[in-house]
Amino acid sequence: MITSLGERHLLLRHHEHGHGHDHGHGDLIETKTRGSRRIKVVKRVLDANDITAGRNRELFACKKVFVLNMMSSPGSGKTTTLEKTLARLMPEMKAAVIVGDICTTNDADRLASSGAPVVQINTDQFGGDCHLAAHVIEKALDGIDLDAIDLLIVENIGNLVCPAEFDIGEDKRVVVLSVTEGEDKPAKYPLMFRVCDAALINKTDLLPYLDYDLKAAEETIARINPGMSVFKISAKTEDGFDAWLDWLKDQVRVKLG
Ligand SMILES: Nc1nc2c(ncn2[C@@H]2O[C@H](COP(=O)(O)OP(=O)(O)OP(=O)(O)O)[C@@H](O)[C@H]2O)c(=O)[nH]1
Ligand SMILES: [Mg+2]
Ligand SMILES: [Zn+2]
């Protein structure tokens, strides 16, 4: 049972975008005639996801809520990082969480102990989508009083690929990368690192037991996204949390104005 401010907890299930996996954004090919030549023009059409994401973003602006989309491969430490983050930010900062998983309410159960309102989304019944799309977030917002919070964190489904393609109306994006995954992950999954504003290199407490090349990971991230803020943390020991929390608080402050 998940306890939450306002007793709000819901399970959302949706069925769009199953495992045919059409992640395209509706590219349209138009043919134009220039004299005797026919030219094919590929136009990116603003698809339904972008429209819904825009509507979410307007709502968040109107309600003055800063929204963070947290993404990573499975098990990098999103929930653990959030548990520790919420424990240190609340109750001064009023926060809520939307957490996405294919199955189970495990993460919601863990996060609810923070006292923050938690909405769990499960995508298992209808194809098990491996990302959160904007319309799912829009539905989940029915379970959150946006007037009562300053910060909304979305823990996306564990997946280093397609969540990066789906705008949900967030203000900033953060990717968690744990040292047990290998330093080559930013190079292998560059889109995720390109679209995110910050990276958390997590589980640094395990570095003494690994051959992880931290410098190589940081250099690759800097090459893919030179503007990215990078924080080395351990969600277990909370090492490095001060700098990460300062970054997060600054983002909220800027949004609240
Ligand atoms: N040693 C160590 N273990 C960690 C750290 N952070 C998380 N873990 C462990 O890693 C495992 C996965 O952590 P979670 O926080 O559940 O990861 P997640 O990214 O939320 O996983 P999914 O939601 O399933 O994608 C758990 O056993 C955690 O206890 C850390 O900083 N150091
Ligand atoms: Mg989790
Ligand atoms: Zn997907």
Image: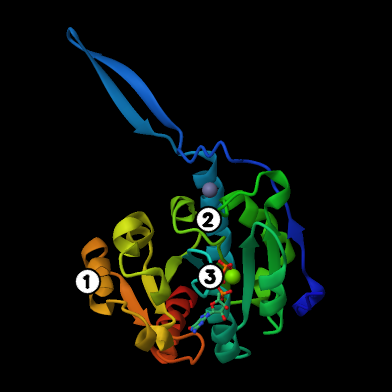
Q: Residue at x 62, y 62 (%)?
A: 100
Q: What is the x, y in percent for residue 251?
A: 43, 77
Measure how far apart labels 1 and 3 are at the Cα level.
23 Å
Q: Which of the two discs, 1 and 3, sits closer to the camera? A: 3
Q: Is mark 1 within 8 Å of ligand 1?
A: no
Q: Is residue 252 left or right of residue 214?
A: right
- Closer to the chain start, of discs 2 and 1, is 2
How busy is the neighbourhood of tag 3: few (under 14 within 10 Å), some, or many (20 plus)?
some
Residue that sits furthest to the top in the current view: 36
Give the amino acid type for the residue marked by disc 1 in the picture: Glu
- Asked if one can make out residue 13 in the rendered structure from this viewpoint, the answer is yes
Kindly indicate the quadrant of the structure image that contains residue 109. Answer: bottom right
- Closer to the chain start, of discs 3 and 2, is 3
Task: Name the residue beneath numbered marker 2.
Answer: 168
Q: Residue at x 63, y 66 (%)?
A: 99
Task: Name the residue beneath numbered marker 3.
Answer: 75
Q: Is residue 245 above or below residue 122?
A: below
Task: Name the residue beneath numbered marker 1.
Answer: 219
Query: Could you tell me which secondary element the residue under label 3 belongs to?
Result: loop
How busy is the neighbourhood of tag 1: few (under 14 within 10 Å), some, or many (20 plus)?
some
The residue nearer to you, when weighing 122 against 25, is: 122
Q: What is the x, y in percent for residue 21?
A: 53, 39
Give the amino acid type for the residue marked by disc 2 in the picture: Ile
**Image quarter in which the C terminus is found:** bottom left
- Asked if one can make out residue 246 in the rendered structure from this viewpoint, the answer is no
Query: Could you tell me which secondary element the residue under label 1 belongs to?
Result: helix
Q: Which of the two discs, 3 and 2, sits closer to the camera? A: 3
